[in-house]
């Protein structure tokens, strides 16, 4: 469980994270989504005490990370930047980190096996590919068998097999009842793994919603074809309805369901040749969400209807 | 009853309980030190530097016009490599910390030990444990072999039992260990290998010469004797040069040069974002 309250980080005049408040629950994969530079990495660094918040608090499993007696058992973290000495072998890297907690060679070999690095365990990390480095980072995150796993852009540099492997791993970890918090700047990736989303932009919270709700909330247009579009537009016009003419007797209607449009057209006696609901993709929903945040200068006023 | 206890006992048994502790941090730092090739190479380099320099001095001394009269301090001649060896070993101290910053390893380290200060203490302990015994052994080796060389050349020699000799040998090992710890501190303060090494070189190697050139003669010698290398000379030479601190003041001054940067390093490590 991760509880972030009013978390803020300022670097001089620049505010990287601006009053973030959210909770990440155990038992599900929660995506941490936002464009590059939205403050995701900084938030994760504050979670594990690498950066000190300017104000606000970040708690992991009930208390600030630094106060835990066995931090590696509470939270395992993969940060975006590489955090390994290239001259050391993967196994020695894990042994050194595990030693602080009395975690020995048996567990080290176990996680090396989990991430598929057993064969190169004694090779110097400097010669590792990006994907192997990423796997080692994940081995570090799993080393303490932690209740909470935080991974910053874990699919970066992985090949398709590796990406598939990560997706399964994340779901397995969540199924075991752990808290899984994964950042990405790609909605498409999150759509496949996450059940819940924390969306940030410019350091502020844009949305904290289940993935299913985000899809439902996305404004979906309805594609309508009729020989009498002028009359149709007059019949449909109203509050919150946006109609755009596509030309050739076709209009796109946003703000009314296809049922509403069909009924109103019938009442007005207007024939319809086509009535097609347009399914918004998660990617579009996300783009719309972040665009709104930019338009409204990051206010959360529009969140009422989303959340 | 019996079945209940078994059922309750098994989950706890499957998940081992680990604790973060200083013993573990020490072990971790030791694994880190021994698992990077450069650590061993620097220690070996420093030891060789002492041996080779000492033996070269021992075999060339007395070959000029002064002859045997030039040999006033046979111990000092064999220990003349300390000056260079301490730079090599000081680099080890710097790298132990700055290497973690340059590679990003520090983020892994501090995530495992979020209280941070045990990491610095662990690094100092491990470096001292590795450097002091090896440098002490090197000092004994170069002293004994150097005296042999000079004895064979018919030059004056010193023996281990002579007054001040053991102090010089232990003092030399302590000086090199101290310089390594200064290196650790500088690495933690500057978080940059090149910067920390340059500072170390200026402080222990160039400062006496530079000060001699740049400072006004009226108070130059009074100031320069407080530099780490001069303070160390006060307790590592059998026949001290004139104008040095007393041996005990030398020890105290040198200790200040080690402890103050270390305190600064601790404060900054605790405060700064990693």
Image (cartoon, rainbow, N blue to C red):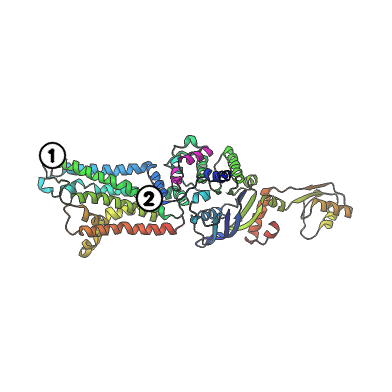
Residue at 31% across / 44% down in the picture?
B43
Residue at 16% across / 53% down in the picture?
B239
Question: Residue A8 at what x, y percent from top left?
Answer: 55, 60
Residue A179 visible in this rendered orientation of the protein = yes
Report the chain holding disc 1: B
Q: Nearer the viewer, residue A144 or B270?
A: A144
Q: Which residue is mark 1?
A: B152
Left or right, residue A77 beside residue A257 = left
Furthest-bottom residue in this view: B218
Q: Check if mark 1 and mark 2 are on a common chain.
A: yes
Q: Which residue is mark 2?
A: B123
Left or right, residue A208 beside residue B5 = right
Secondary structure mostly taken by the magenta-highlighted segment of the chain: helix
Q: Secondary structure at mark 2?
A: helix
Report the chain holding disc 2: B
Give neighbour class at mark 2: few <14, some 14-19, many 20+ (Cα, 10 Å). many
Residue at 41% across / 49% down in the picture?
B25
Question: Residue B254 at what x, y percent from top left?
Answer: 27, 57
Question: In the image, which residues are magenta?
Answer: A95-116
């Amino acid at each position: 469980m991760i509880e972030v309250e009013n978390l803020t980080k300022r670097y001089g005049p620049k505010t990287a994270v601006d009053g973030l408040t959210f909770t990440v629950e155990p038992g599900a994969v929660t995506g941490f989504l936002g464009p590059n530079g939205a403050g995701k990495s900084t938030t994760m660094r504050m979670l594990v005490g690498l950066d000190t918040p300017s104000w606000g608090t970040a708690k992991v499993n009930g208390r600030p990370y630094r106060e835990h007696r066995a931090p590696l058992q509470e939270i395992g973290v993969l940060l975006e930047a590489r955090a390994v000495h290239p001259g050391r072998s993967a196994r020695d890297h894990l042994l050194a980190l595990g030693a602080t907690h009395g975690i020995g060679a048996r567990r080290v070999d176990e996680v090396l096996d989990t991430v598929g690095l057993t064969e190169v365990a004694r090779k110097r990390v400097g010669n590792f590919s990006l994907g192997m480095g990423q796997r080692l980072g994940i081995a570090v995150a799993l080393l303490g068998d932690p209740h909470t796993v935080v991974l910053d852009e874990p699919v970066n540099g992985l090949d398709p097999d590796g990406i598939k492997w990560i997706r399964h791993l994340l779901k397995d970890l969540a199924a075991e009842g752990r808290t899984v918090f994964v950042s990405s700047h790609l909605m498409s990736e999150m759509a496949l793994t996450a059940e819940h989303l924390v969306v940030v932009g410019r350091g502020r919270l844009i949305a904290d919603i289940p993935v299913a709700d985000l899809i439902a909330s996305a404004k979906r247009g309805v594609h309508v074809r009729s020989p009498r579009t002028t009359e149709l537009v007059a019949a449909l016009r109203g509050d919150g309805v946006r109609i755009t003419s596509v030309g050739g007797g076709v209009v796109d209607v946003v703000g009314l369901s296809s049922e509403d449009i069909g009924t109103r057209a019938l009442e007005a006696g207007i024939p319809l040749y086509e009535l097609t609901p347009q399914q918004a993709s998660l990617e579009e929903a996300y783009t719309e969400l972040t665009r709104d945040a930019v338009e409204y200068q990051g206010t959360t006023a529009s969140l009422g209807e989303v959340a | 009853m019996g079945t209940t206890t078994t059922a309750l006992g098994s989950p706890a048994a499957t998940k081992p309980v680990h604790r973060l502790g200083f013993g573990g941090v020490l072990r971790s730092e030791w694994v880190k030190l021994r698992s990077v090739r450069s650590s061993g190479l620097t220690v070996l380099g420093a030891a060789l530097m002492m041996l080779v320099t000492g033996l070269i001095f021992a075999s060339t001394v007395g070959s000029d016009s002064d002859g045997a009269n030039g040999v006033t301090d046979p111990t000092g001649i064999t220990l003349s490599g300390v000056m260079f060896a301490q730079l090599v070993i000081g680099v080890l101290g710097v790298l132990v910390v700055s290497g973690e910053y340059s590679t990003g390893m520090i983020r892994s380290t501090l995530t495992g030990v979020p209280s941070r200060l045990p990491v610095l203490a662990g690094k100092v302990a491990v470096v001292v444990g590795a450097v002091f015994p090896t440098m002490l052994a090197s000092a004994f080796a170069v002293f004994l072999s150097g005296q042999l060389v000079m004895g064979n050349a018919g030059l004056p020699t010193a023996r281990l039992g002579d007054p001040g000799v053991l102090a010089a040998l232990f003092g030399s090992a302590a000086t090199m260990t101290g310089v390594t710890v200064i290196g650790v501190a500088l690495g933690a303060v500057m978080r940059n290998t090149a910067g920390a090494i340059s500072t170390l070189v200026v402080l222990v190697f160039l400062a006496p010469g530079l000060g001699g050139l740049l400072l006004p003669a009226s108070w130059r010698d009074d100031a320069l004797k407080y530099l780490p290398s001069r303070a160390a000379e006060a307790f590592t030479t059998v026949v001290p040069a004139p104008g040095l601190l007393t041996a005990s003041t030398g020890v105290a001054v040198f200790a200040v040069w080690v402890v103050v940067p270390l305190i600064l390093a601790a404060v900054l490590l605790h405060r700064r974002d990693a």
